[in-house]
Image (cartoon, rainbow, N blue to C red):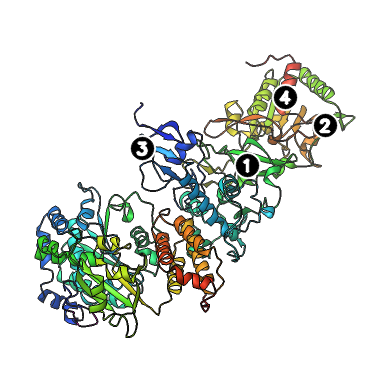
């Protein structure tokens, strides 16, 4: 056996894990999910919900899997009668004061209390004829509501704010069955990463105001994506209902964002649902932009490119995929080429308890990818150069104030009434991040893939496809 | 002595010798009575030698668990690489227990001396004495005694701090006490790690009860053999023990007897038995957290760690609560359950919800609204609340319920059958 590895048996199956592993984590590797509430791999162990009680051979009493470290030869039984009885009794205790208002609770369908009661709880209650504990709903912060009646006091939220956000505004107030999650009287839950408490809450006690009553969990489709809020590149899930993005949640990624995302990223999705999209390719005809089919539009661009020579400028969004950026560069490879982008800056907001995790001041997901492909941050010179360029390509930058004597090709998702790019010769509708598959390179050089969460509107196509088609049409070979 | 009553001939007076003697409170008076000699002696000894004497004496923790004191001290790291701490548990909050209060009121220097000796034995620079918040008088007396001791320089390099609790029963649990000293909410911690490995501020810590430490100077002075000889029944239980007797007896108070002393003699001879015309019905021998004994069990019980266990209960803290035949056991047990429901720290699910639910059922039974299945339900809840939580508060709530229903089932059933006048509680 390798050094520092421990072999133990969980529900009859041998499993080998590094020394120091907790039984609850070892069980996951053996394919066993030990029911739990207070335990969360991203938080300090509390050992308070007592839900993960399991039988460990030779131990005098049941042990909590979340605070028990594996030992060589340990035999763990998660499904013994004793362990199941103990967990069933914890569920009974948790339910006596739980309102069971699942039909109006946002958590229903993704609620760990529902799940584990369904899995191993009992039908009916013995807590007959007593009133349940009642406390009014509290407004904790800009996006967080606290519904104390549903709270099971797992303290994940308290530990997140204390140990991870390092802004300990939440606490357990009162004692016994009067206990509830309290907030410092002069504080608000407005830390830039506070929204994570909503994800961490295993029940519907901490709710997002943004998501309040928007959708039932089972109506949601989930797509793996990468946050576009900044250059950190957090792994996220886009939750869509009927092809509308309704929620952004963190997707565990131990190398980038662990289990968390910031509130900026969490709220950075409404633009993905914009209704004022460019629906068809437009080409200038008699001075007016006119909707045409893709073939005609692409022919027009090919004509422009074939008829021009000399200088070309690409003004791109650092939110475009690396595929699109590479294709744009390839398309203009026959010219004397300049590519530039500009990054919107904001305030940096670190998550103190996690190294190298912050809402970055660079509010763009693919600045690094653009740089790696040869695009520069010298935006103003590029904008000036555009004036005399033969061809200017603007990629997904609707506010670009470009002026040129050459041909202007605009690939974008929207085109406002007074947008400068209205002067373009060709306007090509492209998809946004939720409607395509692509790659971003985060600030640390990590290439990360995102996937399509909803269909493209009308005739929009991904920029990578559009630019690739054009390159092929003008006879440029694929770059291998 | 049977403070506040006159000493009884059957008592073995060691710790309580100066109870009621105000002069012994002063450092001058204490020194005159031989105080701080043991400390001076200990400071010349190797810490291991001090620990060995205490080990040899058979002294066991007087706070409730009865863990051998010398053995506990020897758990501290052999190689000292980081600061060590001593915590003194003076958060005496167990209902029915009031011995530590009297030790601090009358012989504060005995505690300080024992504290300094223990700190030396475990090589701790700093000792914290955590005093129950409601103990205003003992607090004032301890403050004064500590200032006097510091002025006299008796503690050598050992620094003793007094820390005042804020009124939570659970802060008497050793790890909750440490959290409280650290300024955190007084919640018990998961063990392991045990305090000797990672205790106060994460550093090696020993925690001892007031009465335990007050006995240490006597052991050093008079020898381990003398202390070991103080045993009437089982050689595993040695020394003297203070018993705080309250409830239905004619002379309640603190009585100091040798380990193994018959509980019957304590209650009848020393405390004068139940009030005139009354008979003994039940007794809780070790503070509210231990199972209740019937009259027969009480009268057959010997007061040492093993003797009480033999009768189905525990010696605990030595808080003896006595009930005569006028006591309504259902009501008494409800009061105990209500206490635990009030004091549960709310961490563990079983305790937070179970203690309160238990109380509600007890109140319902008393109010004449009990259900036929309530006793089974109470027993089942108690089973679910035992041995499954971080600390033993929820076990403590279950103990009197289980023993009460087992031993006084008739009284419960009388309420359930409507044969007793309902008692409105709440």
Left-right relation of A414 to B91? right
Of helix, strand and loop, which one carries label 1? loop
Residue tagged 4: A465
Left-right relation of B224 to B421? left
Residue tagged 3: A71
Nearer the observer, A173 or A321 = A173
Displayed quadrant of residue B7: bottom left
Which residues make up the magenta segment?
A: B2-8
Q: Are the numbered discs 4 and 3 placed on the same chain, yes or no?
A: yes
Q: Quadrant of the N terminus of chain A?
A: top left
Q: Main secondary structure of the magenta part?
A: loop
Residue that protrudes farthest toward the bottom in the picture: B276
Residue B274 visible in image:
yes
Of badges 3 and 2, nearer the viewer stands: 3
Q: Residue A38: x and y, percent?
A: 49, 50
Q: Chain of mark 1?
A: A
Residue tagged 1: A344
Q: Residue B303: x and y, percent?
A: 24, 67
Displayed quadrant of residue B247: bottom left
The earlier-in-sequence mark between 1 and 3 is 3
Checking the image for residue A280, the label placed there is 2
């Amino acid at each position: 056996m390798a050094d520092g590895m421990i072999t133990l048996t969980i529900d009859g199956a041998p499993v080998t894990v590094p020394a120091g592993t907790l039984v609850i984590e070892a069980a996951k590797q053996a394919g066993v999910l030990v029911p739990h509430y207070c335990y969360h791999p991203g938080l300090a162990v509390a050992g308070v919900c007592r839900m993960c009680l399991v039988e460990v051979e030779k131990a005098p009493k049941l042990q909590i899997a979340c605070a028990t470290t594996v030992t060589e030869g340990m035999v763990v039984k998660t499904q013994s009668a004793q362990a199941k009885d103990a967990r069933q009794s914890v569920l009974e205790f948790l339910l006596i004061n739980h309102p069971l208002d699942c039909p109006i609770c946002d958590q229903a369908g993704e609620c760990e209390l529902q799940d584990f009661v369904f899995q191993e709880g009992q039908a009916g209650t013995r807590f007959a004829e007593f009133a349940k504990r009642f406390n009014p709903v509290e407004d904790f912060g800009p996006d967080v509501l606290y519904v104390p009646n549903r709270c099971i006091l797992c303290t994940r939220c308290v530990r997140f704010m204390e140990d991870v956000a390092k802004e300990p505004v939440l606490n357990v107030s009162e004692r016994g069955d009067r206990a509830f999650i309290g907030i410092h009287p002069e504080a608000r839950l407005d830390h830039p990463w506070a929204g994570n408490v909503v994800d961490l809450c295993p029940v519907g006690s901490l709710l997002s105001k943004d998501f309040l009553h928007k959708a039932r969990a089972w109506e949601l489709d989930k797509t793996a994506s990468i946050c576009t809020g900044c250059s950190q590149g957090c792994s996220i899930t886009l939750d869509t209902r009927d092809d509308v993005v309704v929620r952004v949640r963190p997707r565990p990624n131990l190398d980038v964002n662990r289990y968390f995302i910031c509130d900026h990223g969490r709220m950075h999705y409404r633009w993905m649902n914009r209704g004022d999209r460019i629906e068809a390719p437009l080409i200038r005809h008699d001075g007016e932009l006119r909707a045409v089919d893709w073939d005609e539009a692409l022919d027009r661009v090919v004509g422009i490119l074939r008829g021009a020579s000399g200088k070309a400028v690409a003004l791109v969004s650092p939110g475009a995929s690396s595929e699109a950026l590479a294709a744009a560069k390839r398309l203009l490879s026959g010219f004397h080429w300049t590519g530039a982008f500009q990054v919107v800056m904001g305030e940096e907001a670190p998550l103190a308890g996690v190294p190298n995790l912050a809402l970055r001041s660079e509010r763009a997901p693919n600045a690094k990818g653009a740089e790696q492909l040869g695009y520069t941050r010298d935006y103003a010179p590029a904008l000036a150069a555009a004036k005399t360029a033969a061809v200017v390509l603007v990629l997904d930058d609707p506010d670009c104030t470009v002026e040129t004597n050459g041909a202007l090709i605009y690939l974008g998702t929207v085109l406002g009434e007074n947008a400068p790019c209205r002067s373009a010769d060709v306007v090509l509708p492209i998809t946004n991040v939720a409607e395509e598959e692509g790659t971003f390179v985060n600030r640390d050089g990590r290439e990360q893939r995102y996937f399509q969460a909803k269909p493209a509107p009308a005739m929009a196509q991904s920029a990578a496809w559009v630019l690739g088609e054009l390159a092929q049409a003008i006879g440029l070979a694929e770059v291998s | 002595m049977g403070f506040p009553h006159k000493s009884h001939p059957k008592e073995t007076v060691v710790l309580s010798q100066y109870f009621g003697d105000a002069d012994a409170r002063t450092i001058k008076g204490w020194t005159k009575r031989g105080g701080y000699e043991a400390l001076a002696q200990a400071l010349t000894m190797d810490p291991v030698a001090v620990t060995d004497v205490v080990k040899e004496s058979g002294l066991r923790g007087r706070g409730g668990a009865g863990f051998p004191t010398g053995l506990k001290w020897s758990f501290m790291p052999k190689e000292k690489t980081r600061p060590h701490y001593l915590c003194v548990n003076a958060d005496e909050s167990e209902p029915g227990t009031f011995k530590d209060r009297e030790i601090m009121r009358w012989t504060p220097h005995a505690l300080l001396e024992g504290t300094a000796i223990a700190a030396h034995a475990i090589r701790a620079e700093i000792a914290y004495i955590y005093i129950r918040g409601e103990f205003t008088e003992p607090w004032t007396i301890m403050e004064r005694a500590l200032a006097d001791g510091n002025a006299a320089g008796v503690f050598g390099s050992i620094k003793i701090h007094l820390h005042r609790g804020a009124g939570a029963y659970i802060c008497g649990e050793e790890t909750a006490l440490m959290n409280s000293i650290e300024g955190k909410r007084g919640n018990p911690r998961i063990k392991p790690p045990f305090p000797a490995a990672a205790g106060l501020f994460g550093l090696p810590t020993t925690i001892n009860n007031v009465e335990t430490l007050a006995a240490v100077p006597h052991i050093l002075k008079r020898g381990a053999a003398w202390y070991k000889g103080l045993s009437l029944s089982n050689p595993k239980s040695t020394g003297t023990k203070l018993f705080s007797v309250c409830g239905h007896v004619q002379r309640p108070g603190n009585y100091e007897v040798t380990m193994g002393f018959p509980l019957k003699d304590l209650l009848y001879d020393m405390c004068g038995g139940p009030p005139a015309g009354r008979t003994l019905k039940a007794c809780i021998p070790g503070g509210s957290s231990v199972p209740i004994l019937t009259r027969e069990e009480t009268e057959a019980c010997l007061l040492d760690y093993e003797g009480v266990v033999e009768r189905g209960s525990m010696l605990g803290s030595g808080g003896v609560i006595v009930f005569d035949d006028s006591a309504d056991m259902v009501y008494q047990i409800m009061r105990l359950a209500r206490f635990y429901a009030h004091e549960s720290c709310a961490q563990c699910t079983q305790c937070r919800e179970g203690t309160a639910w238990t109380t509600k059922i007890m109140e319902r039974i008393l109010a004449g609204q009990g259900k036929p299945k309530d006793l089974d339900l109470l027993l089942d809840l108690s089973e679910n609340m035992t041995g499954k939580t971080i600390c033993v508060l929820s076990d403590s709530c279950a103990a009197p319920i289980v023993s009460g229903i087992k031993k006084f089932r008739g009284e419960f059933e009388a309420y359930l059958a409507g044969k007793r006048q309902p008692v409105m509680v709440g």
